[in-house]
Image (spheres, helix red, strand yellow):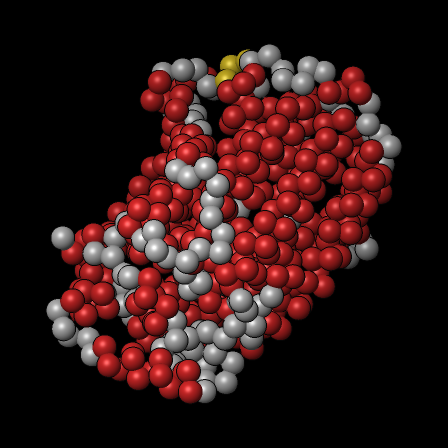
Amino acid sequence: MSLWRTKSIEDSMADSLEKGHNLKRTLGTWDLMIMGVAVAVGAGIFSVGAKAAGSYAGPSVTLAFLLAAITCALAIMCYAEFASAVPVAGSAYTFTYATLGELLAWIIGWDLILEMLTAAAVIAKYWGIYLSSVFALWHWNVPDTVNVLGLEVSWGPFIIVAIFTVLLVLGTKLSARVSGIITVIKVAIVLFVIVVGAFFIKAENYTPFIPESVPTKGGASDAWSQSLFSFMTGAAPAQYGVFGLLAGASLVFFAFIGFDVVATSAEEVKNPQRTLPRGIFAGLAIVTVLYIAVSLVLTGMVPYTVLADDPNASLATAFVSVGAGWAAQVISVGILVGLTTVIMVLLLGLSRVLFSMSRDGLLPRALSVTSEKRRTPARIQIIVGCAVALLAGLTDVGILEEMINIGTLSAFVLVSIAVVVLRRTRPDLKRSFRVPLSPFLPILSAVLCIWLMLNLTTLTWVRFLAWLVVGFIIYFSYGRRHSLVGLRAKGVFDATIREEAVREEFRE
């Protein structure tokens, strides 16, 4: 059936060399490692842990981070195996297309668009807000919005998105260098905060490590805000306890999104079979250590109840509570610096997913044209930049935060399953990295990701289903009819055009 037609790995590799639709390999292990740290270490390291500790897990938020990291690591192993075997742009979309068929590939590509578009818009919005906060440190009253024709427009997102859109159009390597410098600065700020905070730790604040479970405010009657698991089972939503810990893990998983974005750059990596696994795992290891250290300091400085009483709890809340308000200023600067590189990597990842889907014909192929000199998808990059800037500057994107998690987790589930499928369908394929204990670990990865998805709110699931409906409309009205895989099967697409492009590329 055409809905389940797959695109062979050989076709994916050949298409990546098609002149005018290909990317330049310029990234090394260090670039990938920095990219992973750049996208994962943002505002979340200063705020998500505090929110999870105060509202869900208490001091056991450290375990929530560890569980989220393990889940991410299992999924990333699956990504690493695929990326080393199929070093082509598109990440989970490309991997799914090669194993589970076109319809599921479209769904996962559509989910990745949801993840990266909403994440880039949300973070660009917060960047503008924190920029005004940093100005306030110098007593400069600069509002984060301006009135334009009766509309309240956040001006910060337009500036930061425009800067990185230009850099990405000029070249991925240049963008990676700028990102690397900023990433080193923000990691230094995080380490400074950890060291200073350690002097205020009190052991009694870690007790009880897993607080006793209590009903959440609003109870079971608040159907939209409770988790889908609670809604389906009829269990009363609860804070703290073991289920609170698991809910906290679902929330802090937001802090680990982005490593799948690194995999989207596979087509721009030198020696990808070796470089990709090393870069991805090194980045994940650094991020996990930083998050666990921050959460230990945070919950050791103040009782978790202090964080629970603050609706906008962050690491700054803990420092203000112990009389070190000056550190809150450092944290504000750290957040601004941290958000900067996250935006860049998300803009890169979103453009590469759209590039891959359009090169396959599921979206207009004209979008996948790359510049002759720099071989960057300038058209898509500019469109992505405009969409993110408009969404962040003109709308209230805060309601979309959990959509980022569900988009990421759904991609993780399918990639984990696809690894098992590819092992059976293509045992001959050369893999420089293999997930150990397969199929047990890939299946465990899928199960853990599904569990985290079930702990997201029912309202998030409803919005997710609405997004999928829109995706199905686009696929069946355009993508299915223009798919190159389908056209080749019918003999409509002239494969010799691609073959000549490949030969010309090799001659160069």
Residue 386 in view: no
- Horizontal relation, residue 477 to residue 156: left or right: left
**Residue at the outermost front position:** 428
Residue 87 in view: yes
Q: Residue at x 47, y 78 (%)?
A: 375
Q: Residue at x 60, y 33 (%)?
A: 66
In this rendering, the answer to whether 165 lies above or below 216 is below
Q: Residue at x 54, y 22 (%)?
A: 244
Q: Point out residue 391 in the picture as x, y percentages from the top left corner.
A: 46, 57
Say which of 284 and 56 sits in front: 284
In this rendering, the answer to whether 342 lies above or below 383 is above
Say which of 49 and 82 sits in front: 82
Q: Point out residue 251 in the picture as x, y percentages from the top left corner.
A: 53, 34
Q: Point out residue 307 in the picture as x, y percentages from the top left corner.
A: 68, 27
Q: Quadrant of the C terminus?
A: bottom left
Say which of 462 and 421 sits in front: 421
Q: Point out residue 113 in the picture as x, y percentages from the top left corner.
A: 40, 55
- Horizontal relation, residue 10 to residue 351: left or right: left
**Total numbered labels placed on residues in the image:** 0
Q: Residue at x 82, y 27 (%)?
A: 201
Say which of 455 and 262 sits in front: 262
In this rendering, the answer to whether 282 lies above or below 302 is below
